[in-house]
Amino acid sequence: MAAESRSSLNERQRVAYESHRRDLITWLTRMGKSPDKLEGYAHDTAKVYATILDKFHRWAWEHSGGYTLDLDHDHADTYIRQMVLAEDDYSTTYLNNIKLALAVYFRYRDDADEWECPITISSDSGAKQPKEFVHLDERKAIREAALEFGTVPSYFALDPEGRTEWKRFLARRFGKPMKEVGPQEFKRANGFKYPSLVHASLDAGLRPVEVGRAKTYWVDLDNAALHIPADESSKNEDNWSVSLRRETAEYLARWMEERQMYEAYDDTDALWLTRHGNPYSSSSLKYLLDQLRELAGIERSLSWYAIRHSTGTYMAREEDLAAAQSQLRHRSVETTMKYDNVSVEDRRDALDRMG
């Protein structure tokens, strides 16, 4: 069990999960390869599969509301889709190992129906992208939805009855007594947190973990860029400078000033926190994206990684592959450019054309 798994569980959950892990690893090494022939996997293969399945469980706990060992095919379908959408981070070999490990897991669970991977993963040309993709018109619609999301009428423009209704609504939204809702809460509801978060994510193709880790000192308003330090980047390898549209930089400037008004940010450099004061995660970002989709009239489901994938694709079309690699901070040998051959200014121009 990885340290990350151990630290996320209480003592009783650790005991139960350790028992599950021992049973799983024993099964993998003694009969996992061919249960009918009692043929197990080699030690190294069993270790790879066990590590992948440990990560799968941690992901499920984050997305299922807490610890559980009751994982089903829907969990696996969603997980493999997210891993494929992050293919710039994972090699085809690793993606295939995830696919195989998940199939083995459900054999271990003795499910009546074998799990079938919903994504085609090619052994020679990489993973085939799912149909999740944010098109140009949808990118623009999501940008516009972020400007409209959560807005409320002016406090002083409402009649007493209307003001009472909106105060009741905002009391629920901000988790405070209705009597404490005043002009400041109305102003807060029309703030720039969501526009800055959504527009920066569309520009930079921010991964969920990067939204959660984002710090105020990443923001370079003068140059309309994000500077992500190596020790805070997704893969902890390189320092990155990522272009932003000028309008995104303006939203960030407004938000940087506004965030100082809220107590949740008093003792943290976090750029964005949820309304409960927590860093954003895949699940909280999925919830936000669902709200934006509805507002934008996009009826199909989208993941946060679909935004990232579209940013890379359109950047490559508008500029070139080197620009896309720099903008998305690619890490693998096949996709990472050691040097940024396209200037920040040129990439910003491409963002303006992309919408």
Image (tube, helix red, strand yellow):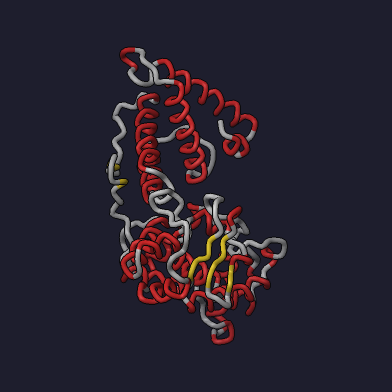
Task: Return the x and y of residue 95 as percentages of the image width and height.
Answer: 37, 40
Residue at 40% over, 40% down: 75
Residue at 29% over, 44% down: 119
Question: Does residue 179 show up?
Answer: no
Q: Quadrant of the N terminus?
A: top right
Task: Return the x and y of residue 181 as percentages of the image width and height.
Answer: 64, 73
Name the one closer to the observer, 109 or 307.
Answer: 307
Position above or below: 268 against 63: below
Position above or below: 3 against 134: above
Left or right, 114 with respect to 292, comes to left
Image mark count:
0
Name the one closer to the observer, 292 or 49.
Answer: 49
Residue positioned most to the top: 37
Name the one closer to the observer, 323 or 202.
Answer: 323
Name the one closer to the observer, 111 or 136.
Answer: 136
Residue at 39% over, 53% down: 335
Residue at 55% over, 51% down: 237
Left or right, 318 with respect to 217, comes to left
